[in-house]
Amino acid sequence: MKAFQTLCKQLRSKAFSVEPAHIAGFSTSSYSCGPKKKNPYEEVDQTRYSELVKSVLSFRGPAQTPESLLEEDALLFGPVSKAKPPKQDKARVPRNWFPIFNPGRSLKPNTSEPSVPLKIPLQRNMIPSVTRVLQRTMTAEQIFYLERWRQRMILELGEDGFAEYTSNIFLQGKRFHEALENILSAEGNIKEEDESPLACGHIRSVQHLLKDVCGVRALESAVQHRALQYVGLLDCVAEYRGKLCVIDWKTSEKPKPFLQNTYDNPLQVVAYMGALNHDANYSFQVQCGLIVVAYKDGSPAHAHFLNAELCSHYWAKWLLRLEEYKEKVRSQDGQKPGEGQDAARAGAALPVGEEGSLSPAC
């Protein structure tokens, strides 16, 4: 017994201790039996922290405005590159409105129409032609591109070469119109041996469209608008797919698949249409237009049809151009020599059917 007591004293003196073994067990909870970890927030001074939160929440700055937001964005992200929206010009309305259609003229076809298409000669007088009005009222942008094209052609061909080029283009257009006149007249179709080499490609180009053209009423015939004081020489009035149209034949070396590619040609067509509808020499009325662009290589021509609504739209534009022309004529006396002639020079240098699609002089 004494020996056992002595052994226990020796063990206590050596600080020898035995830890109890952990008992393994199963539990469905995530609770750990190990020592609990300290929460760092417990060491925070709660009183001081609550006062800080209250001070932040109770603070209210000035209300934000669009200007202050822009300043803040500029400070954070740098200046904003803002593109200004394009200025929209107010729709101009002609001061002196005149209808394109004649309410006193019947739209029904005239059963007593002549067997030979009308061909009224153009009387040369002081009244301006449609082509002259359009040439003198071209926009600055049109004049710029026409002049740039002319200078480029002169650099490529030289002065003499450019003059020959424009002459050939004009001759091609003239022969093309002559060939069409022979085909569409009551005399019958053109013979192959009479077909001009200069018009061959253009005639092949419009061959598929000629099948839809019938009932020709006028060919190379003059029209005059006495109320608005202008004249013109239209190419053709005929039925196209059952619609009576003023048809304008054009030639071009570049494809013009869309109406916008024809530039001022729609204005020219509606100007002829409005004059015809109020010209006493014609007993019928036309409400549609057709622009046909033929190509020298014989590729299929593009046909641009103008219905009555579209014709009315371009008629308003034509009235504006006519008013602009008359204003220029009135102010011409106060101009110095040579002023106001840029459009005329650009138009004179432009061949038929080329850049700008101007028509031959009436």
Image: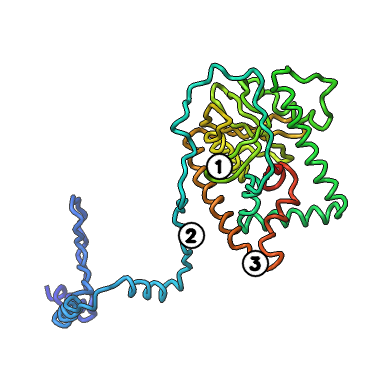
State which quarter of the image contains the N terminus: bottom left
Foreground mark, 3 or 1? 1
Percent of width and height locating residue 324: 56, 55
Residue highlighted by disc 2? 86
Q: Residue placed farthest to the left in the image?
A: 1
Q: Are marks 2 and 3 in contact (CB under 8 Å)?
A: no
Q: Are marks 3 and 1 in contact (CB under 8 Å)?
A: no
Foreground mark, 2 or 1? 1
Query: Label 3 to label 1, Cα distance in Å?
Result: 28 Å
The answer to which quarter of the image holds residue 240 is: top right
Q: Amino acid at mark 2?
A: Pro
* Residue 335's disc number: 3
Query: Label 2 to label 1, Cα distance in Å?
Result: 40 Å
Label 2 or label 1, whichever comes before in sequence order:
2
Q: Amino acid at mark 1?
A: Arg
Query: Label 2 to label 3, Cα distance in Å?
Result: 33 Å
Residue highlighted by disc 1? 226
The answer to which quarter of the image holds residue 326 is: bottom right
Label 3 or label 1, whichever comes before in sequence order:
1
Residue displayed at 48% across by 22% down: 108
- Whether residue 116 sits left or right of residue 242 in the image: it is right
- Whether residue 157 sits left or right of residue 173 in the image: it is right
Label 2 or label 3, whichever comes before in sequence order:
2
Residue displayed at 62% across by 67% down: 334
Residue 138's place in the image compared with 117, above or below, is: below
